[in-house]
Image (cartoon, grey):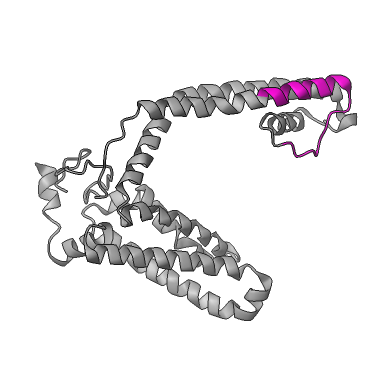
Amino acid sequence: MENKQKHSGLTGWRKKLHDIIFEAETPLGKTFDVTLLVLIVLSVFAVLIDSVPGIHQKYGDLLFMAEWIFTILFSIEYLLRIYTTFRPKKYIFSFYGIIDLLAILPTYLSLVLIGSQYLLVIRMLRLLRVFRVLKLARYVGASHVLAIAMKNSRHKIVVFLEVVVTMVVIMGSLMYLIEGPENGFKSIPLSIYWAIVTLTTVGYGDIAPQTFLGQLLASVIMITGYAIIAVPTGIISVEMAKAKDTPVSTQICPDCHYDYHDQDAVYCKKCGSKL
């Protein structure tokens, strides 16, 4: 009951702004979000082309001005999001809240740390809102299934990673003993690095075994690598098959910012606030 009363505190212009900024169900809300996505793409594009020496030399001042214009607009948007939510801390420390903050910080940091403005490419993460903006509910539901599968398989994945770490430490140590510093394996940590590169089938080729035993061990690691790659895929696939793919809406709870609700939900399934 307390949560429902809190939700009723969003009235007047604050409530209207909240619907425009946080929701994509209304024409104004969708227009706002589409405009935001366009600005995000343009701002990231400006950062990317600014790193090209010829373009920077010719249009550096113009791109610098554009960067600050984008940052000021995103800063205003960030402050409006804080203002129009009933619990500002919930938004600030939410996933999207942190991403929104990181999207504007690099420009201000560039006043102190030269070059930090190129970190603005993190704004691309804000494009995750495209699923909500375009009302692609089936894709939102699919991402929810994937999130559930990842969560349910986390213990198996941790055990798998422990086994892999143990393997590369043992194999790296063996390779150090077999090859030694004279063949490029100058230390056990460096040999472990080689084992990781080989087991994952990356194979940079910066270090290679020279002896017959070393090449034999390398062959075993390579073949093992192909078998190991399939393990996490199988684990997650099984959990995805178990996860229930239920239709979800794109509505955000104004109180706790939970965003995976059933399409016919009236109250937030996490905090109980009225949607």
Q: Is residue 30 visible?
A: yes
Q: Nearer the viewer, residue 144 or 61?
A: 144
Quick check: is 222 in the magenta stretch?
yes
Residue 193 picture quarter: top right
Please state the horizontal and vertical placement of residue 117, each as a whole percent of the image.
55, 65
Please state the horizontal and vertical placement of residue 115, each as a whole percent of the image.
60, 65
Q: Is residue 14 left or right of residue 188?
A: left
Q: Residue at 44% across / 64% down in the picture?
A: 40
In this view, which residue lies farthest toward the right?
182
Q: Nearer the viewer, residue 267 or 131?
A: 131
Residue 2 picture quarter: top left
Q: Is residue 246 left or right of residue 73?
A: left
| Bounds of the magenta segment | 203-224
> Residue 106, relative to residue 221: is it above or below?
below
Q: Residue at 37% across / 52% down in the picture?
A: 96
Q: Residue at 37% across / 65% down in the picture?
A: 36
Q: Is residue 194 left or right of residue 208?
A: left
Please state the horizontal and vertical placement of residue 275, each as a whole percent of the image.
17, 48
Q: Is residue 97 visible?
A: no
Q: Residue at 43% across / 25% down in the picture?
A: 238
Considering the image in quadrants, where does the N terminus appear? top left
Quick check: is 216 in the magenta stretch?
yes
Please state the horizontal and vertical placement of residue 87, each as a whole percent of the image.
24, 52
Tag count in the figure? 0
Residue 192 picture quarter: top right
